[in-house]
Amino acid sequence: MAYGRIELCKMIRVNPSVFIVLTWVMVSSSCAVNEPTAQQILDSAIQKHGYKSGEPLEIQFDFRGNHYNARISDKGDVYKRTSYKGGNELEDIVTSNTFIRRVNQKEVRMEEDSISSILAGDTRSVVYFALLPYAANREVISKHLMPSIKIKEDTYYKVEVTYGKNGGGKNFENIFVYWINQKTHTIDYLAYSYYINGGGVRFREAYNQREVNGVLFQDYVNYTIDSDFPAHELDYAFQTDQLREISRIDIENVQVTR
């Protein structure tokens, strides 16, 4: 053991660059051990927001005049939107692979599959955002941990996620970016790109965080930008006042049954 240390010291005296290389290797190894993965960061955020693996929940809330009911469990999720039009009660019921519409509690057959797809997608998308980050790991094609960044006074992990058919709302291969607070582990900002109706990007800033029966819920300020920006660069656009507010995403009358 002593012989090894003597030989190492001789190497450093002969070639000081050996010391630099060894130091770099030690620092790199330390960083590799301590840096969490994108998966670990998302899992931590899901737990912080109050969602526990295997625990069934029923969540109800109101959004823009419609009532939503989400039953979530390891056996599968069921989302329902209830709305009223022309004196009729309309119910849209969505699972991972089915869609049912009821009018005044009677099931009706949709004449076009495209209409069913739109209604199912709209329902799924509203529930997805309301329950974030519950479904952040669903239908994922890839996850990528980007360099951490400071926004206002807090430092954030930055995770880019590409979703498949039913993940991230309703559009195939949506790209989402989540900014997860390194201290609180909450998702304080998110951005996404979409490809319908000409495509575009959105950036959302969370506010009005509150806990309902152990689950954290947030409302969002919804921003867009008129110039061409990828979703992962919208943090820069936000901090340089290039974004334009277009709406508020507020959910009301939240109830959670465990």
Image (cartoon, rainbow, N blue to C red):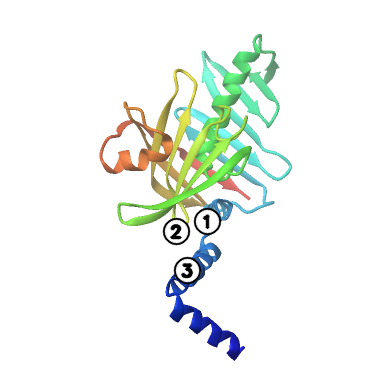
Q: Position of residue 198 (x, y in %)?
A: 44, 18
Q: Residue at 49% x, 34% y: name it.
A: 62
Residue to which mark 2 is pinned: 184
Q: Residue at 62% x, 88% y: name it.
A: 1
Outermost residue on the right side: it is 75
Disc 2/disc 1 C-alpha distance (Å): 8 Å
Disc 3/disc 2 C-alpha distance (Å): 36 Å
Which mark, by number, is residue 48? Answer: 1
Q: Is 196 on the left-hand or right-hand side of 203?
A: right
61 or 223, nearer to the observer: 223
Instruction: Determine contact: label 2, label 1, CB under 8 Å.
Output: yes
Q: Position of residue 20 (x, y in %)?
A: 43, 71
How many numbered dots are placed on residues in this image? Answer: 3
- Of badges 1 and 3, the one in the foreground is 3
Q: Is 42 on the left-hand or right-hand side of 197?
A: right
Q: Earlier in the sequence, mark 2 or mark 1?
A: 1
Query: How dense is the environment of label 1, judged by Cα within 10 Å: few (below 14), some, or many (20 and up)?
Result: some
53 or 25, nearer to the observer: 25
Outermost residue on the left side: it is 241
Q: Residue at 30% x, 34% y: name it.
A: 243
Residue to which mark 3 is pinned: 21
Disc 1/disc 3 C-alpha distance (Å): 40 Å
What is the secondary structure assignment of the residue under circle 2? loop
Q: Compared with residue 53, is residue 67 higher up or lower down, i.e. above or below? A: above
38 or 90, nearer to the observer: 38
Q: Position of residue 170 (x, y in %)?
A: 56, 28
